[in-house]
Image: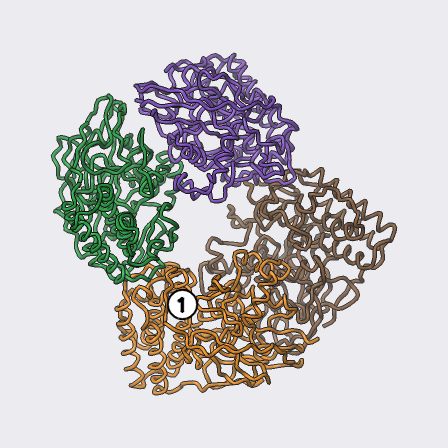
Chain colours: A brown, B purple, C green, D orange
Amino acid sequence: MTSQTQSRIDDSAALHEAFRRVRGTTQRLVEPLSAEDCAVQSMPDASPAKWHLAHTSWYFETFVLGNRDPHYEPFRSEFRYLFNSYYNGVGDQYPRPQRGLLTRPGLDEVLEYRAYVDAEMGALLEADVLSPALLEIAELGLHHEQQHQELLLTDLKHMFSHNPSGPVYRRTLDSPDPQPGKPLSWFRNPEGLQWIGYEGDGFSFDNERPRHRVFLHEFEFASRPVTNGEYLAFMADAGYERPELWLADGWAASRNWKAPLYWVPGEGGWERLTLAGIAPVRESAPVCHVSYYEADAYARWLGARLPTEAEWECAADGAPLAGNFLESDRLDPVPNAAADERPSQLYGDVWEWTQSAYSPYPGFVPPAGAVGEYNGKFMCNQFVLRGGSCVTSQDHIRPTYRNFFYPDARWQFSGIRLARDAS
Amino acid sequence: MTSQTQSRIDDSAALHEAFRRVRGTTQRLVEPLSAEDCAVQSMPDASPAKWHLAHTSWYFETFVLGNRDPHYEPFRSEFRYLFNSYYNGVGDQYPRPQRGLLTRPGLDEVLEYRAYVDAEMGALLEADVLSPALLEIAELGLHHEQQHQELLLTDLKHMFSHNPSGPVYRRTLDSPDPQPGKPLSWFRNPEGLQWIGYEGDGFSFDNERPRHRVFLHEFEFASRPVTNGEYLAFMADAGYERPELWLADGWAASRNWKAPLYWVPGEGGWERLTLAGIAPVRESAPVCHVSYYEADAYARWLGARLPTEAEWECAADGAPLAGNFLESDRLDPVPNAAADERPSQLYGDVWEWTQSAYSPYPGFVPPAGAVGEYNGKFMCNQFVLRGGSCVTSQDHIRPTYRNFFYPDARWQFSGIRLARDAS
Amino acid sequence: MTSQTQSRIDDSAALHEAFRRVRGTTQRLVEPLSAEDCAVQSMPDASPAKWHLAHTSWYFETFVLGNRDPHYEPFRSEFRYLFNSYYNGVGDQYPRPQRGLLTRPGLDEVLEYRAYVDAEMGALLEADVLSPALLEIAELGLHHEQQHQELLLTDLKHMFSHNPSGPVYRRTLDSPDPQPGKPLSWFRNPEGLQWIGYEGDGFSFDNERPRHRVFLHEFEFASRPVTNGEYLAFMADAGYERPELWLADGWAASRNWKAPLYWVPGEGGWERLTLAGIAPVRESAPVCHVSYYEADAYARWLGARLPTEAEWECAADGAPLAGNFLESDRLDPVPNAAADERPSQLYGDVWEWTQSAYSPYPGFVPPAGAVGEYNGKFMCNQFVLRGGSCVTSQDHIRPTYRNFFYPDARWQFSGIRLARDAS
Amino acid sequence: MTSQTQSRIDDSAALHEAFRRVRGTTQRLVEPLSAEDCAVQSMPDASPAKWHLAHTSWYFETFVLGNRDPHYEPFRSEFRYLFNSYYNGVGDQYPRPQRGLLTRPGLDEVLEYRAYVDAEMGALLEADVLSPALLEIAELGLHHEQQHQELLLTDLKHMFSHNPSGPVYRRTLDSPDPQPGKPLSWFRNPEGLQWIGYEGDGFSFDNERPRHRVFLHEFEFASRPVTNGEYLAFMADAGYERPELWLADGWAASRNWKAPLYWVPGEGGWERLTLAGIAPVRESAPVCHVSYYEADAYARWLGARLPTEAEWECAADGAPLAGNFLESDRLDPVPNAAADERPSQLYGDVWEWTQSAYSPYPGFVPPAGAVGEYNGKFMCNQFVLRGGSCVTSQDHIRPTYRNFFYPDARWQFSGIRLARDAS
């Protein structure tokens, strides 16, 4: 398959432009939030919005500003510890499950911190004095920040879900009119040796490289993600109560689950918590907020399976990198409107679980230094998801992009793409 | 012994005056705090400041305003559930360990809630239309609010202690000059039948009643609370490492303790986290933030014991109800400055653990209705503390006042008073 | 009240006789058991039968044989550590929750250990060479062994209850014919100063001393323990689902309880697991295997309360120390057959929860040395039970006997005696 | 690569012979054990020896005897529930963490159960009346029993390790004389399309099939497993304290680890618990009882990595299926004695962790019915190990054999084989 690429940002002016854009997006995301909304943490896996704001600034301060100038004066010296996520190479970290206890610095001070870092970075970029290596690390910082933009929204949604008074991030979801769901069809992919992974001039994470060959057996790939309507049929068929449909670990994990996360029983059937409050479960929209275990059980129930990440990448070859992303500002998956000529809705809407455990590509070598901890040390016990979601930035995603979460995670915008062996 | 009493507030005008005063104090306590400071919860046993602000208003709304007028329009209907602490008679409760997840209502809205309740209460008190029974419940609400004022400060201190950047509630502690500690002496109390418990015209909690007789054996009572200096000697004598000094449950609970809560090793010895930041451990001040287990082990180390609550109450008979209370605005225990003619520093500074398990007095009957849940259902597994602390309101305390906490609790301003059998 | 006493065993011959009798009883208790039955531990609070066999021998080896002769050769040197229960003064202890992992020494070797200790002790007692102090410690060892006889049976019952194949300790319970229950009546006790605690020539534990005065208010004491039939009425009245009946801690602890421990739904109503297998719930027999929380909730439901231990001791004054004990070999509580002239069934059948937290009597001083850890260090967080049960030895019990367990414990033969304030 | 095969046992007489042999081996394994040794369970992941004895018989009773004859009279009807491991298709299961609570049936009765099943199976095999499908299931039962033979020993070792009195399974390990370790060398494997997985006439588990193609990049494969001496160098280089060497999950899991499982500090250096008691750590023997996390960290420390399972299988192509297996009766890994012409010690001694997450082969379909739960439902969160160990039966292993455990598991005889990318 061919590898779709965006050009790498290798000049200071272009990076400055991107820096302003990405940093500004982050700031806009918190505009509807109060200081309290930004301070609280609802589980160890999630972080307060304020922490995301600070940590993404910490990245630039630590890896760009501090690396360039040994005499750099940090905004606050204690932030090096407080807002280090997991970089042992930088030093110890404030305990992750306690991030929500840091009422100080307050939101105001964290916004000052952002302004300070923005000014320092702006001056360097303006002056065009960053080495190519630091330009590269700065570009990585922008992709890093886009990842945290997504987490900021998913973590916020999780936190709001514990509040019975129904808080909303925004009043309405700008969703298109409902439309009848299209039947799912299958596309056949022949067996053969394929290339996957990133190669090119653009940006990519280390975990997408090196590009390498895999042998794929013939398989079929579903035309679109599984819809709520289809998932309701699984539920109606006692899908959550039949152990033969589940992985053993999934069966154990799911004993208190009756539906996807954020679904609540309403008067006229299931409803969902969204960032705009309670909304109906629309049958034609992709099912969302399911774990790997649920995706796997659903697939088994249908006599299908999840695709491997190599299958996904090959099936996506040539598909337009378009969809319902953060830029559409809907913050919610929408029904599929594409024609049936090829697999569609691969990008945006919902991350698609693959059956591939997250592991290093053949020949993978993490970069030297603390930045080498970015991806490599998590290559264990997690599963790869592909394609991005309605809260992912469009210019952040690539065909070779590998997201990863533990198989019981449900608070991401994660859905189901089916595959099956060719019969 | 005689029972010291304040007059009960039984007319509307006096209650209105007290209402304004107590409610105003609560409001002043949160003035130095940001919205974030008020939102966060550091452990299941503690509550966010905002929750204290709301719950104390909920009390008046539920038990006074709602009881008086069946058509009373609550400020927000969902608050009945959100801010119910533990009154099953009122209905279900939002889970206590999740109080810190409620970023909405925000602090602003909770302050509006307070203003709304204040206005409604003020109108009724002004018009003098509350029945004697409701006046009584309103008065209970003021004592209830004073209890939460204290908890607000202790919970805040606990939360701040998790923040390595050293947040302060206020810049300085207004402490008197250090003075040399006075040696501890003992006062003998003869055996005999004694009356304890509350009887009189003033306010008291149900758990202080009925006044009843107990037989006390001859005992000796320490002249003042144990000081930091004395406690340091226990630590220096390996007090935390010698199982023979500890109750079995205390030994198990204390395996990670090396010193009182909030003590941290400093360059020149132990230091303490206070509401004004790090401060030295002053030898002549009462030791504070110790559990029942530590108090008991310290006493055993010295060949003494803790007093029973009846002994405490009798030993305190006739002592002036004065001391370092919230009104002194020091928020920290201070060295004892009293003459040595009788046991002193009984009130204020630090709550004094007694060896008495918290249980009902003979003939105890909780009041009917949900308010009956106030005290009675906690009469199990806790120990009685006496005398109030530096964050207790002076007009809240009485000689017969029974505070109670689990024996492993350390985040209250709790200290040690010794007793011993007469030799 | 008068203090009923047995004479202290103060001569070697008498002690030898008692030693043979008590040690023989222990041995007889394990006769129906396989080596496997004796090896397994069902929860951290329980111990394997084999451990009880060894630990009771360890007592004599450590505190008598080893103390008398510094050159005493222990049976196995590692037993000093393996079978030390909780005596820090003797040294470290093998972790209590892992006692069931010790498949070696096997039952055979532990029985050899017993024989070895019996022979050594027998020789000393025969030769009459033990000092009075060691005779005293040896006598304590016999009472200690009787306590473990009871625990051996209660721990075994708990372990068997996890086996769905219905293991039995013995084929039949030798129970008398059922008889109609007698209505509960009340006996009035006047207020006044009373003596409680042990004083006399006989054996007593340190925690029963010193004898001292307490003031009791007038109270009424129930004629007999609460029966299964009465408890079924509480259950039928939704006793387990009404929070207003429960202590707060009890409500939390009881969320998965529907009935006393070991009760299982049968075809014709509730049935019980006994040491002879499944048996019907007989309405006229005392309810058994209830926690303090259930006893307290039942009493509150009936408008009564539990007695204090002082009330119990005074109400029992003069009652014959007789009842359904281990000696009757029924191993199950039986209906009350006594006349109604005074409170009956005080001894044997079921331990009776009192509302008294287990704490030291005024003037209590534990003996010096490791034996001082026997009782004193547990005086926290537990409640006193009185009167013995159907698995207690009759010659082990006294009116002043204080048993103690945590309020959520249900695996002892514990039942309910009611009291109430005089109206 | 070629696929080494044993012929499938497809006639009744041959199966009878194998049945007698395998069942006899199991019986011999428990001969040195007491009934108590066979009853106890040391952790939820391990089972009592008695349970292994019963469960392997349950397999034949449930899947062969019961399937053949609907009127088959089971030995005990309750065993269907008690000794079902995880087959939901058969019914509910007795809770796994409580297997050690089943003192009844005793070992005697379980051995009777085995004899009963042996007689029933023997009669059918003698009469040659089993259908081909049931013969196949019976053969699977023998491989199943061989797996449990290995677990019986590893679970026993784990249980013994909690006993400070040093129990031994057998007096001596029959180990060869120590010999100097040989330096590790590397063998190069060219890139290319390879076949892996089982195909042939012999027995294999479903998870080894179907045979399929994979593309392998050029890699190097270590000549032998990592030795204790090499692993000691990692430990001496602070391997357990350097986060940069560890996967994030491994770092969290290993905070209390200082050495491989069962290593204990001795006077002259590290020693190990073995099935024959304490033994020295012999530098030239393969390191054993390490988790995936330790294997991975060790490899990273050396600049190498673990092989994928496909790499392992290809590197093993043509190697003789010989080694230190259960049949050698050493029960302990021994130093490598092979020539250096090719990778050696692939089979026996220690299971070798691969970096491959355990997942279905392309086209994998589990068999219908409850037997389909054998392998498939565990294909999540575990890692593949290859080659068998010193407690695996030699005739149980195959080049395509896939064992699997969670990455933190250390109680299996698991060691480290290194690979690296071709430079």
User: If the image is split into quadrants, where does the N terminus of chain B sit?
Assistant: top left
Q: Looking at the image, which residue is at 17% across and 35% down? A: C5
Q: Looking at the image, which residue is at 59% across and 35% down? A: B271
Vertical placement of residue D159 versus C154, above or below: below
Q: Which residue is mark 1?
A: D277
Q: Can residue C58 be seen from the camera position used here?
A: yes
Q: Is residue D186 left or right of residue A5?
A: left
Chain under callout 1:
D
Residue toward you, A414 or B293:
B293
Pinpoint residue D177: horizontal percent, then vertical percent. Answer: 47, 78
Residue toward you, C304 or A277:
C304
Pinpoint residue C111: horizontal percent, then vertical percent. Answer: 24, 59
Vertical placement of residue D186 versus B49, above or below: below
Residue toward you, D105 or C213:
C213
Rate crowding at label 1 as few (under 14), some (14 to 19) or many (20 or more) other CA atoms within 10 Å: some
Could you tell me the amino acid type at mark 1?
A: Gly
Q: Is residue A384 left or right of residue A135?
A: left
Disc tally is 1
Q: Where, by quadrant of the figure, is residue A51 drawn?
A: top right
Q: Secondary structure at mark 1?
A: strand
Q: Where, by quadrant of the figure, is residue D222 drawn?
A: bottom right
Pinpoint residue C240: horizontal percent, then vertical percent. Answer: 34, 41
Pinpoint residue D103: horizontal percent, then vertical percent. Answer: 29, 61
User: If the image is split into quadrants, where does the C terminus of chain B sit?
Assistant: top left
